[in-house]
């Protein structure tokens, strides 16, 4: 038995929560005229750097990471970016 397709225009306007529930029970293929999008997301390239720190400094970073709930690398990255902004805006 073939599945009857619906029109996308038959979908009533919904808030984010209702849309989430709707798409939990439906597939895009259920709708006539559906096609795969070509939108691609790309992150800007980043460079990896390594640095050596004293064990005491690493403990301080780890303690602050645990306190704030921010990953160690993300925390250090945010500190570096903050300092760069200060230099650039000086």
Image (tube, grey):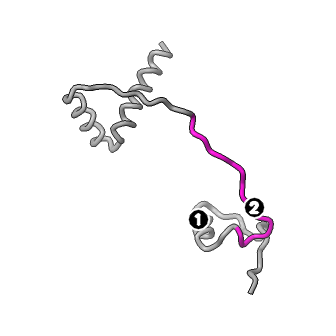
> Residue 81 at what x, y percent from top left?
44, 26
Q: Mark 1 highlights which residue?
A: 20
Q: In this view, does 43 lie to the left or right of 54?
A: right
Magenta residues, dominant SS class: loop
| Residue at (71% x, 69% y) in the render | 29
Judge from the rendering whether residue 40 lies leftward or rightward of residue 58; answer left or right.
Answer: right
Q: Which residue lies furthest to the bottom in this view?
A: 1
The image quarter in which residue 83 lies: top left
Q: Callout 2: helix, strand or loop?
A: loop
Q: Residue at x 72, y 72 (%)?
A: 30
Question: Would residue 82 be found to the left or right of residue 25 on screen?
Answer: left
Number of numbered labels in the structure image: 2
Sequence-first disc among 1 and 2: 1
Residue placed most toward the observer, 82 or 43 = 43
**Residues in magenta, as a range:** 29-44
Q: In this view, does 36 lie above or below 7?
A: above
Question: In the image, residue 64 lies at what x, y percent?
Answer: 28, 36
């Amino acid at each position: 038995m073939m599945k009857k397709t619906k029109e996308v225009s038959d979908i009533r306007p919904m808030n984010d929560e209702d849309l989430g529930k709707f798409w939990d029970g439906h597939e895009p293929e259920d709708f006539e005229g559906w096609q795969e999008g070509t939108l691609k997301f790309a992150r800007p390239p980043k460079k990896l750097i390594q640095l050596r720190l004293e064990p005491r400094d690493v403990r301080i970073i780890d303690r602050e990471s645990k306190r704030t709930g921010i990953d160690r690398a993300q925390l250090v990255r945010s500190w570096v970016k903050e300092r760069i902004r200060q230099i650039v805006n000086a």
